[in-house]
Image (tube, rainbow, N blue to C red):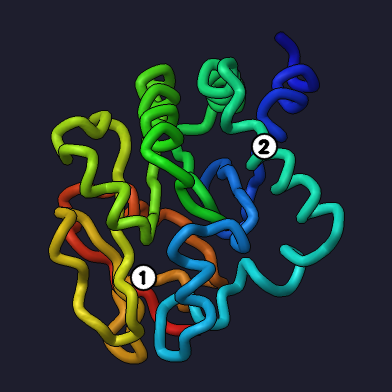
Amino acid sequence: MNAQERKLITGGLSKPSKMPGYSYNLPAIHCKTGSKLAQIPGTTCHGCYALKGRYRFPNVMDAMMRRLSSITRPDWARTMAADINARKSRWFRWHDSGDIQSVKHLLKIFHVCRMTPDVAHWLPTREAGLLSKIPADRVPANLTIRLSATKVDGPAPGSWPLTSTVVTTGRSCPAPDQGNACLDCRACWDKDIKNIAYGKH
């Protein structure tokens, strides 16, 4: 299967300039939890970057909607894994826009991770309810799932071992000091780091 055929099945990957590798995005308007939080001031989803700017361009939205439709295909996981492996990158981020849609979707992502054993995967999510249905020890070894806090300057979630928070002071993410890029930082993928504190922007 060539690159064009894979893209027709999965909708294609994205490559955010900030990241060390590739990513996959879905429309943020279809986030189960995040779309509700986006309406509430003081939450980490209020003013979401993925609901404005280039994410609102018709061609970008069309591409994300195609990806959303593709996740129910029976050949999605196998094709996603083939596409990720073909990129020869050691790092992958799930959902620079959007979030997991269901337990079935999450289990498909697990399958992709198992078929890409040489790739480190990172999946940020606000879907605590979905994670509650998955034992933490079932997560593939090469996948780091971080449950995101709900409120700016609020506590890290206590229901999942790896988390992220958004703070107005005391951030740990170095990206704002280095051209808004990860550069050589891989903290988000590092399971030894229990919480990542992102600066509010």
Query: 123 or 135, which is in the foreground?
Result: 135
Q: How many marks?
A: 2
Q: Amino acid at mark 2?
A: Ser
Query: 161 or 176, which is in the foreground?
Result: 161
Secondary element at tag 1: loop
The image shows residue 129 at horizontal and vertical percentages of 29, 54
Front disc: 2 or 1? 2
Whether 105 is drawn above or below 127: the answer is: above
Precedes in sequence: disc 2 or disc 1: 2
The image shows residue 19 at horizontal and vertical percentages of 53, 53
Please tell me which residue is depicted at 29% across the width and 86% down the height of the picture: 153
Q: Are marks 2 and 1 in contact (CB under 8 Å)?
A: no
The image shows residue 43 at horizontal and vertical percentages of 41, 82
Residue 123, which numbered label? none
Please tell me which residue is depicted at 70% across the width and 48% down the height of the picture: 64
Query: 171 or 132, which is in the foreground?
Result: 132
Please tell me which residue is depicted at 29% across the width and 66% down the height of the picture: 164
The image shows residue 54 at horizontal and vertical percentages of 76, 66
Please tell me which residue is depicted at 27% across the width and 29% down the height of the picture: 140
Residue bearing mark 2: 69
Whether 115 is drawn above or below 30: the answer is: above
Q: Amino acid at mark 1?
A: Cys
Q: Residue furthest right?
A: 58
| Mark 2 Cα-neighbour bin, 10 Å: few <14, some 14–19, many ≥20 | few
Quadrant of image for the N terminus: top right
On screen, residue 174 versus residue 193, left or right, reads right
Residue bearing mark 1: 173
Secondary element at tag 2: helix
The alpha-carbon separation of the residues under discs 2 and 1 comes to 33 Å
Whether 62 is drawn above or below 34: the answer is: above
